Image (spheres, rainbow, N blue to C red):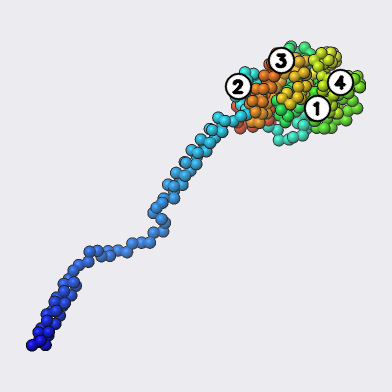
Amino acid sequence: LEAAAARQYYETLLARLSTATGQDKLQLPEARVIDRAPVPEAPSAPRPKLLGAFGGLLGLTVAIIVAVIMEMTRSSFRTRREIEAQTGHRVLATLPRMRRHDMRRIVSGLRGRSNTVFGERMRQLKTVLLMRRGRYDKQVIMVASSRPGEGKSTVAMALAEMAVLAGKEVVVVDGDLRCSSLVKNFGWTPEHDFADFVLERCALDEAILTDAELGINVLPTANHSVAAADELSADWLAPMMDELKAVYDVVIIDSPPLLEVADGLVLARVADSIVYVVRWDKTPRQAVAEGLEALAAMRLGVAGIVLNQADPRYTENSYGEAYGAYAK
């Protein structure tokens, strides 16, 4: 009986298993493949073009913000308007950046190519300064700056050359008795110099040499002398200037930097006109303000300012640039 019962139970289970297997085969799948998806050739995300455009826009925005901040915090001058607004003095000329650094070649080049932008600007400066006191009046013009390296000596010699080309008898006084470089830059070999005259080692005419190529007379400083600088005084310089004006139409003083030594302020007292040289994007605004204040404290006026070594890409257009392009 037990064997029959076990056999019957086994057959029942086998029947149930067969039924369940048949039902499983009848169930439909929840999903089926209709078509195989193609393999993508490029990523769908992130989008490179969109990200590139966004990155470029973000970079441009940051660059503009940085440029605005730098412009607002810049401590130097770049335009005529900036100088005139801050100093209250007129800009007489904006001189372009010169590729050559040979001072003699720059000045002598005015003879052959005075119709360049630099030549026209120097002619403009010469005309304004010489006409201030009348066409035939003799005068003393001092070229000053706040610090060394601002192009003051180049401006002084170029101004002298333009006056010579206009038919004037000109003498340049190298007033930097402590650290002059004119003699070296122009290759002069003076027997006597300004320091010798100050220390009464020679007469005034013995200390003056003539540059035959440029046609400029020069009272040079070859031997740097603190003792001679200490002897400078307006009372002593005034008779010397009168003696020079008796012979020459224009006396141009190449002054030492006003913020470096006091000699420049002494020389300024015997000048009829003072031209202040500011180097484009280099001379600190504070240095310009201090130099002008030092002159004002001595009740010495400034004829105007020369913005030197200017990059034409950042300065305002003017007649000189247009004429220079036309003349070429």
Q: Nearer the viewer, residue 3 or 163?
A: 3
**Is disc 3 in contact with disc 1, using a CB cutoff of under 8 Å?**
no
Q: Position of residue 217 (x, y in %)?
A: 84, 23
Q: Which mark is residue 178?
A: 1
Mark 1 Cα-neighbour bin, 10 Å: few <14, some 14–19, many ≥20: some
Q: Residue at x 66, y 31 (%)?
A: 282
Instruction: Give the residue at mark 4.
Output: 198
Q: Residue at x 60, y 24 (%)?
A: 82
**Is disc 2 in contact with disc 1, using a CB cutoff of under 8 Å?**
no
Q: Which of pointers 2 and 4 indicates the residue nearer the eye? A: 4
Q: Which mark is residue 86?
A: 2
Q: Position of residue 52 (x, y in %)?
A: 46, 47
Q: Secondary structure at mark 4?
A: helix
Q: Secondary structure at mark 3?
A: loop
Instruction: Residue type at mark 3: give it.
Output: Met
Distance between the alpha carbons at the discs numbered 2 and 1: 31 Å
Mark 3 Cα-neighbour bin, 10 Å: few <14, some 14–19, many ≥20: few
Q: State left or right for residue 92 relative to residue 45.
A: right
**Is disc 3 in contact with disc 4, using a CB cutoff of under 8 Å?**
no
Q: State left or right for residue 23 relative to residue 108.
A: left
Q: Residue at x 53, y 36 (%)?
A: 66
Instruction: Give the residue at mark 3.
Output: 298
Specify the quadrant of the image occupied by residue 44: bottom left
Mark 2 Cα-neighbour bin, 10 Å: few <14, some 14–19, many ≥20: few
Distance between the alpha carbons at the discs numbered 3 and 4: 23 Å
Residue extending farthest to the left is 1
Distance between the alpha carbons at the discs numbered 3 and 1: 22 Å
